[in-house]
Amino acid sequence: MAHGKEHHHGHAHGHGAPEYRFCPKCGGGLERRVVKNGEPARLVCSDCAFIFYLDPKVVAGTVFTIDRRVVLLRRGVEPSLGKWVFPGGYVDRGESVADAAVRETKEESCLDVRLGPIVGVYSYAGSPNVIVVYAAEVVGGELSAGDESVEAGALPG
């Protein structure tokens, strides 16, 4: 999660849904309406009837070891300021999930990695994030805290 992306798209990424008030097509007011029975209410333009779907955000991350120790980063930004996490961040539109995992790992840990298999895909009720986690192997760089991290370490697993 680099480049101050919390501000890049105009809202804190998915850690609370943003409140959109105006239609991106015509500028009309948006209101919540059930469009199809059995589905949640959607944002619908009161002027042009455009349906504004709030899609999930895809997050890509990696887990790997150095000298049999798990690499983790202490977050320097909200959410979860000060907590230890594996390297990861949001996938940009048009970017592959795999490329985002490699990029975010480099930005956050200063390490180059080669991806292995997917460890898992995770999502949680109430969160807009879908998290794709890859196993990885370090192929270059030197571990240090990069973007949005205040500390990097290889901790006993």
Image: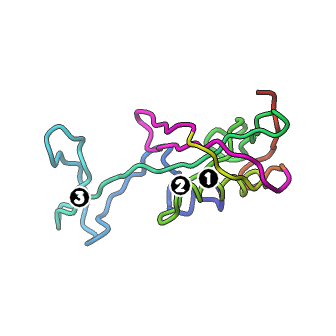
- Looking at the image, residue 3 sits to the left or right of residue 42; the answer is right
Front residue (pair 143, 124): 143
* Residue pointed to by mark 2: 97
Numbered badge on residue 101: 1
Q: Which numbered disc, 1 or 3, marks the residue that appears first in the sequence?
A: 3
* Residue pointed to by mark 3: 51
Q: Position of residue 118 (x, y in %)?
A: 56, 42
Q: CA distance from mark 2 to mark 3?
A: 27 Å
Q: CA distance from mark 1 to mark 2?
A: 6 Å
Tell me what residue is drawn at x 21 percent, y 41 percent: 39
Give the SS element for disc 3.
strand
Q: Against 47, is 38 above or below?
A: above
| Amino acid residing under circle 3 | Ile
Q: Against 135, is 107 above or below?
A: below
Give the SS element for disc 1.
helix
Q: Against 5, is 136 above or below?
A: above
| Amino acid residing under circle 1 | Ala
Pair 2/3: label in front: 2
Q: Which residues are magenta?
A: 119-142
The quarter of the image holding the C terminus is top right
